[in-house]
Every structure is written in C-alpha cells, then in structure tokens.
Image: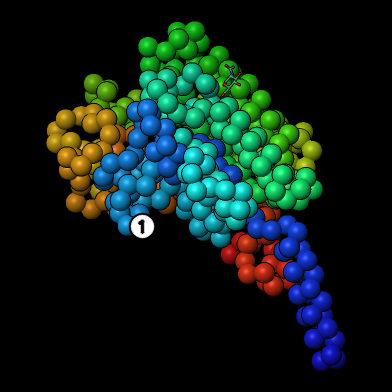
C-alpha cells in the first residue's frame, strides 16, 4: 500500500516534470491602450501620450513613473495578480528577450492606440491594434525559432490573450470633429466599421495561435472628467455613454459568434459598464468620495491634459474614482478588475493555475484560487 503511494507520487512527479518541461509556463499577451500600457509609450520618444512624469506611478513600486497612466495598477495587472499570472513587461522595453517572454508573456498596449489605425493621430506616435498584432507576429516567429514550432504552438494556444481597446476610437477619433471618421460615419456605421475591423484583427490573432482570448468592453466614457468638463452642464455626456453601450453590445455579439465558429477558440467578451456607472452615481456606496474630477489636477485649470509635477494631488487617492482627466485610479481599477474576473469566471479560460510544478502537475484545476 505504502509502496504504491510512493510509486504513484514518484510517477506523478516524473510526469509532472515532463509536462512542465515541454509546455512551460502559462503567460499572457496583452493588447490595449493607455488603460493597459505598462511602459511602451516611454519608448515612443515622439509620442505625446506619455505617463513619464510624476505623479504617475506614485502608488506603484518605488513610486516613480513607470509608464502606467494611473497612480497604481492597471486592470490587467490586478486580474493577472489575482489569477496567479506573471505581469507581462512592455514589448518595447529593450530588456525583453525570448526568455523573458517565455517566463512572463508580453504587453503591446500603447497609450492613444485604437482599433483603427487613424485613431489618436494627434498623439503623433502610438501603437494601433494592427501595429500591436504585427509586433506579436514577430514575437511568434522569435519564439518558434527559440523553442521549435510544436512547443511554440502549445505555448501560444495555452496563453490567455487580452484585447482592451476602443475608447480612443471614440474619444480621440469619432467624437472629434477634426477627424475624418467623425463626418464619414454615423453612430451605427462607425460601430459596424469598428466591428468589421476588430473581427479581422481577432481572426489574425487566432491564425497566430490565440485560443483563449478576452475582449474587455468600455465603461461609461462620457463620465470621464474630461468629458464632463467639456460639457456645459458638468454632467456626463450621454452621447458618449450611449456609444459605449452600443460598442459593448456589438462586441458581445461578435465574440459570441467568433467563439462558436472558430475551431478550438474560447473567445469571450466582458465589460464593467454597469458597476462603474453605479460607482459614478453613488461613490459613497463604494467608499469613494469623488467621482467627477481628477485626483491629479492643475489648480483650477481644467481640463488639465495630463498629470505633471506642478499638479496638485487630492488628499486621499484611494477615494477618487479618477486619477487624471481620462484614467481611473488604482482603487477604481480594482473594482473593475474584480467585476471582470466575476464576468469571465476567471478569464473565461481554463488555463491551469501556474502553481509550483508538482501541484499543477497533480491537479490542473480549471479554476484558479
Ligand atoms: C493599418 O496599419 C497596418 C500597419 O500597422 C497596415 O498593415 C494595414 O494595412 C493598415 N490598415 C488599414 C485599413 O489602413
């Protein structure tokens, strides 16, 4: 009896080592905009979308700017942390090599980027989703060369992919009269155009090996401080909110369709619109004291385009929903992340918990703790 147990354990650990050896770690690949950027724009030296000055990053690590467009963690940071995945570094960080990617995944997100190439033009430099996918294609080639075609296929098939863009396609494109798209399309045809583009992009990702993919929807973007201050009443811009809801509805439909048609795919959509909307209306219910202005602002001058060392900070950063004119605070991101984890039932994918080797070998569980 005892001998059997020992033998079983031994076998399990040998099998475990074998499995571990060939499929390596589960890591994520992130595509997004400033809500998910972890430093790519720092390396786009001409980009006007920068989070490179204090007080960005004040509640993260050593408190110095790290390229995140918030005071602390991004939504993707928190989801990854809570599900035991490593934090992927910024793709443009020169220290990112094949080995780093095999251990941590990689993040292509770029402030100002959109689903459409033309979005965010006035930032001069940003990585659009197409560009991010092009860079990812390069990554798949690098990894194939490093570990071989078969292992690479498995590596990418097992990885959770996050695609989180869309607000810039409205805020820094369609809703701005300076952009051609704002007078070429109407609300309905613009969203159709976005969906056609997103569908092509997700198909390319599928062709490149993505099987577990989550698309994050939009929040009530008409309620970001910038939109409020631009409205004469100081209230949320209902038009922008309606567009976010339409975008979410159309994306949800697209993802259901793709999920059912694409071989081997678990392609899911999730948004946190409702909860953010409620937080904005009833901040006290969630422990916030302010949901309409940025924690980091420049005196009474609004909109302050960005947070800078000459800005003043709110007294308690954890009590503000918004960090700057555009971006939620760490505390708000935590709320969004928890909501998305709930919606996706951990990422909607059954990636085994990247737990210590013997554990994951014995019990690859569909649910992460
Ligand atoms: C978008 O940009 C990519 C390069 O980043 C290019 O390959 C593609 O053709 C462009 N698409 C459109 C519709 O302009």
- The picture places residue 276, in percent across and down from the top left corner, at 41, 42
Local packing at callout 1 (Cα closer than 10 Å; few below 14, some 14-19, many 20+) is: few
- The picture places residue 361, in percent across and down from the top left corner, at 73, 68
Q: Is residue 259 above or below residue 89?
A: above
Q: Is residue 43 visible?
A: yes
- The picture places residue 90, in percent across and down from the top left corner, at 49, 44
Left or right: where 343 falls relative to 221: right
Q: Is residue 219 above or below residue 319?
A: above
Secondary-structure class at tag 1: loop
**Residue shown at 56% from the left, 57% from the top:** 85
Left or right: where 215 falls relative to 228: right
Q: Residue furthest left?
A: 299
Q: Which residue is mark 1?
A: 61
State the residue in front, 292 or 212.
Answer: 212
State the residue in front, 150 or 87.
Answer: 150
The image quadrant that residue 18 belongs to is: bottom right
Left or right: where 298 falls relative to 288: left
Count every numbered label the image shows and give the total: 1
**Residue shown at 59% from the left, 44% from the top:** 29
Q: Is residue 241 above or below residue 10?
A: above
Q: How is the image coloured?
A: rainbow
């Amino acid at each position: 009896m005892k001998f059997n147990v020992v033998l079983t354990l031994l076998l399990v650990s040998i099998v475990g080592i074998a499995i571990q050896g060939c499929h390596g770690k589960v890591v994520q690949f992130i595509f997004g905009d400033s809500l998910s950027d972890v430093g790519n724009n720092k390396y786009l030296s001409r980009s006007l979308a920068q989070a490179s000055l204090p007080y960005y990053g004040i509640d993260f690590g050593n408190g110095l700017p790290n390229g995140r467009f918030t005071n602390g963690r991004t939504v993707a940071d928190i989801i990854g942390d809570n599900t035991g995945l490593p934090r992927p570094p910024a793709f443009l960080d020169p220290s990112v090599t094949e080995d780093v990617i095999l251990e941590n995944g990689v993040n292509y997100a770029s402030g100002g980027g959109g689903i459409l190439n033309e979005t965010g033009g006035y930032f001069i430099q940003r990585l659009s989703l197409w560009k991010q996918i092009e860079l990812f294609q390069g990554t798949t080639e690098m990894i194939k060369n490093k570990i071989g075609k078969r292992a690479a296929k498995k590596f990418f098939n097992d990885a959770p992919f996050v695609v989180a863009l869309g607000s810039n396609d409205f805020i820094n494109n369609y809703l701005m009269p300076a952009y051609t798209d704002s007078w070429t399309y109407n609300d309905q045809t613009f969203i159709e155009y976005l969906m056609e583009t997103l569908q092509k992009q997700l198909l390319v990702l599928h062709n490149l090996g993505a099987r577990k993919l989550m698309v994050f929807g939009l929040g009530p973007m008409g309620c970001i401080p910038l939109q409020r201050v631009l409205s004469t009443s100081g209230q949320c811009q209902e038009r922008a909110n309606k567009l976010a809801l339409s975008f979410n509805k159309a994306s949800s439909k697209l993802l259901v369709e793709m999920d059912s048609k694409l071989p081997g795919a678990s392609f899911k959509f999730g948004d946190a619109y409702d909860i953010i909307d409620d937080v904005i209306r009833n901040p006290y219910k969630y422990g916030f004291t302010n949901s309409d202005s940025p924690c980091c602002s420049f005196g009474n001058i609004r909109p302050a385009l960005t947070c800078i060392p000459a800005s003043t900070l709110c007294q308690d950063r954890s009590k503000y929903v918004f960090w700057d004119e555009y971006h939620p605070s760490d505390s708000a991101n935590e709320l969004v992340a928890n909501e998305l984890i709930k919606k996706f039932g951990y990422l909607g994918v059954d990636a085994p918990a990247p737990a210590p080797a013997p554990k994951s070998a014995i019990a690859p569980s569909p649910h992460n703790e």
